[in-house]
Amino acid sequence: MDAAIDLLATLDPFAGGGGARAPGLRRYLLLDVFTDAPLRGNQLAVFTDGRGLEAERMQLIARELNLSETVFMLPARSGGDVRIRIFTPGSELPFAGHPVLGSAIVAGLGLRRSSVALETEAGIVPVELARGEGRARSGRMEQPIPTWREYERAGELLAALGVERSLLPVEIYDNGPHHVYVTLGSEEEVARLAPDMRGLLALGEVEANCFAGSGSRWKTRMFAPAVGVPEDPATGSAAGPLALHLARHGQIAFGEQIEIRQGQEIGRPSLLYARVHGSAGRVERIDVGGSAVIVAAGDFLL
């Protein structure tokens, strides 16, 4: 039996005649993001060369992989180091947190840089990089500052989530994705949530974030079935607006860093850090950080 496994370990299904690699291969890396340990956090595929792929092809590849997000790297064209396009299984996103962090770590390794500027459809996102624990690397991104308003379909949202009320106003923040925030009374309430996915789907492309906590420690879950993500293990694009939401409503101070835990209920525990600088009248900067680990590399034959 060992001999069979030894033979299978050398199998290369993409080799042509004479052992040559087949043309049409597309290399990708698989990362676990917002964790410093493999097999946790939020999975991300990064195709290191997306040149020549049309958007429709990128979308099909993202659907094939069926991860929360898949990234395609492209040459910069607006002053950044690398341009990226981000796809969920269902649609393209102008900005998302864990794809930016994971892509920045890949770009930093490849370019041998301690900081990179990624061009996204929502603008350039600068990311500072550092060595983490073991194989992990950490980074901190400066996120687009969102706009916000009262969410007009709060009643429908609460019904779909199966909760009676939110302790803070239900508001929607736009930093590329559209994140709505519902405040619950305890972390246990957040853990017990069992949303009606059809009800959430009827609300369209909004990301429903339910959270609880106090001080610098918060727990959150995010549901977005309309973009192909029933529940997200770690939502970097939601972490910055969550810190802003808490600061605007007096739950934390501006400039205070918070720790956000997410993903335990789906077996992918994640840890994110977020901080907002400025004031309610003038938000100056939002930064979100965490770690990531490269766990695999592979090829698509297209």
Image: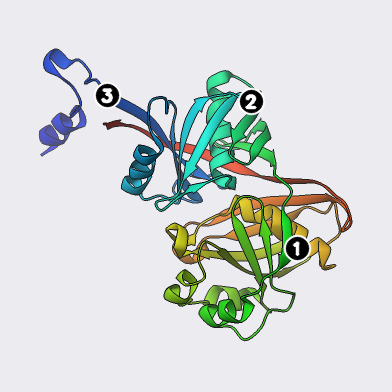
Q: Is residue 195 above or below residue 109?
A: below
Q: Which residue is mark 1?
A: 245
- Horizontally, is 144 left or right of 196 in the view? right
Q: Could you give the CA–CA distance between mark 2 and mark 1, rounded to whole angstroms?
A: 31 Å
Q: Which residue is mark 2?
A: 78
Q: Is residue 147 above or below residue 94?
A: below
Image quadrant occupied by the N terminus? top left
- Horizontally, is 228 left or right of 78 in the view? left
Q: Tell me the element at label 2.
A: loop
Q: Tell me the element at label 1.
A: helix
Marker disc for residue 108:
none
Q: Earlier in the sequence, mark 3 or mark 2?
A: 3
Q: Earlier in the sequence, mark 2 or mark 1?
A: 2
Q: Is residue 84 above or below residue 267?
A: above
Disc 2 + disc 1, Cβ < 8 Å = no
Find residue 97 and report its horizontal and vertical position in percent. Answer: 59, 46
Marker disc for residue 24:
3
- Horizontally, is 284 left or right of 101 in the view? right
Query: Mark 3 packing: few (<14 Cα in 10 Å), some, or many (20+)?
Result: few
Q: Is residue 265 above or below residue 298?
A: below
* Circle 2 or circle 1, nearest the eye: 2
Disc 3 + disc 2, Cβ < 8 Å = no
Q: Judge by depth and name the residue closer to the eye, 236 or 33.
A: 236
